[in-house]
Amino acid sequence: MRDFLNVWNQAMFMLAPVMLGLSVLIYIFYKIRLSSLKTPKEKYDYISNKESKFFMASHIAIALAIVFLFNTYKDDAVALSVVWFFIRLFIAVCIGTLHVYVAHLVLKYYYPAKQHKKLEILRYMPRINPKNGNKMKLLGEDEEDAYLDEGMQAEEDVFSVDYDVWIDVETGDTQIEKYEGRLHAMKCDRCGFHTLKLDKEEILKEATEHENGEIQKEYKCTYCKRIKRKTVKLSKKKSESDFAVSDKTRFVDDPLGLDIRVALVKMEIHSNKGEKREFEFNNLKNAQNFLKEFDFAKLKKEEDS
């Protein structure tokens, strides 16, 4: 047992600094790769797509270093019984797993707010015309439509994509940058724009307690008008016994307010002329933010004109 522990300890003492070094190397590689990118847009895309993944990989390496290092703790006590060896190993794995889990929570819930500020700086950082070095001006929502084609405008209308248009006032050179919008829309396989959205649903077969049903979802491209249909299974209906109220059942008066089990929020805005606009949100918070930012005055002007 003592000989095995000596070999084990040597391996753990070697692997712990190796994992710490790997963690540092991952972070350094990320920074070097980021600094090698020239334009703010390239840095924006790299940070939004890769940063959290690199940080998570670095934390996993740190967690492994903690596991290896902890497996050298209280070596004298472990030598007395093989049971203590497995207890120490189990505790070490638990500590490493806890570190990874905490890092995951921080990167998922806390860090996005800080990352958003960093991305906002990169997005609105003044652009330089590569041809002559002039500073470019960012156009407003009303001005940029003149530089976007119909497909791009359709993507913006459904909030699936947001375009920024930078212009060199002296020469008229323009630079169009594409960013992810507030709402999700699928890519149309005909026109290539992200304008394919759910238009309507039709139940083809009702679900029963013994058999699944079917529902047909119809997606429509707001640009090229392509219609795509998809059939989805409906789960079996639950019997009355499945809904029996137990002592632990808690009724919620306002489930939307608590944002519990809300998978989709659909919103329809009807105009005085009978026109209708539909919007979909994956949670209540996004719907509330949309209502705060939606330009109802602009909509009214479009109706009056």
Image: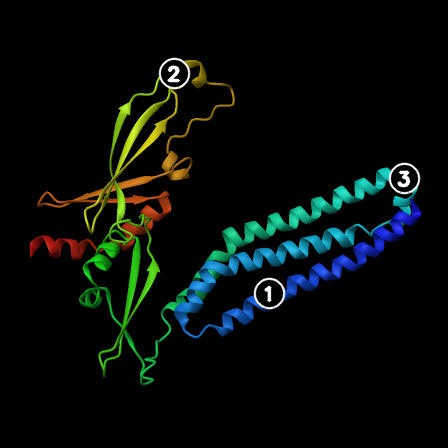
* Residue 157 position within the rendered picture, expressed as x and y whole percent measured from the top left: 23, 54
In the rendered image, the residue lying farthest to the left is 305
Badge 1 element: helix
Say the numbered circle drawn on residue 225: none
How was the colour assigned to the protein in this rendering?
Answer: rainbow
In terms of sequence position, does the residue under pointer 1 or pointer 3 come before the other?
Answer: 1
The residue carrying pointer 2 sits among few (fewer than 14), some (14 to 19) or many (20 or more) residues within 10 Å by Cα, namely: few
Distance between the alpha carbons at the discs numbered 2 and 1: 54 Å
Say the numbered circle drawn on residue 209: 2
Q: Are the two marked residues, 2 and 1, in contact with CB atoms closer than 8 angstroms?
A: no
The residue carrying pointer 1 sits among few (fewer than 14), some (14 to 19) or many (20 or more) residues within 10 Å by Cα, namely: some
Q: Quadrant of the N terminus?
A: top right
**Quarter-of-image position of residue 302:** bottom left
In this picture, residue 41 sits left or right of residue 174: right
* Residue 242 position within the rendered picture, expressed as x and y whole percent measured from the top left: 45, 17
Residue, disc 3: 81
The residue carrying pointer 3 sits among few (fewer than 14), some (14 to 19) or many (20 or more) residues within 10 Å by Cα, namely: few
In this picture, residue 139 sits left or right of residue 77: left
Residue, disc 1: 27
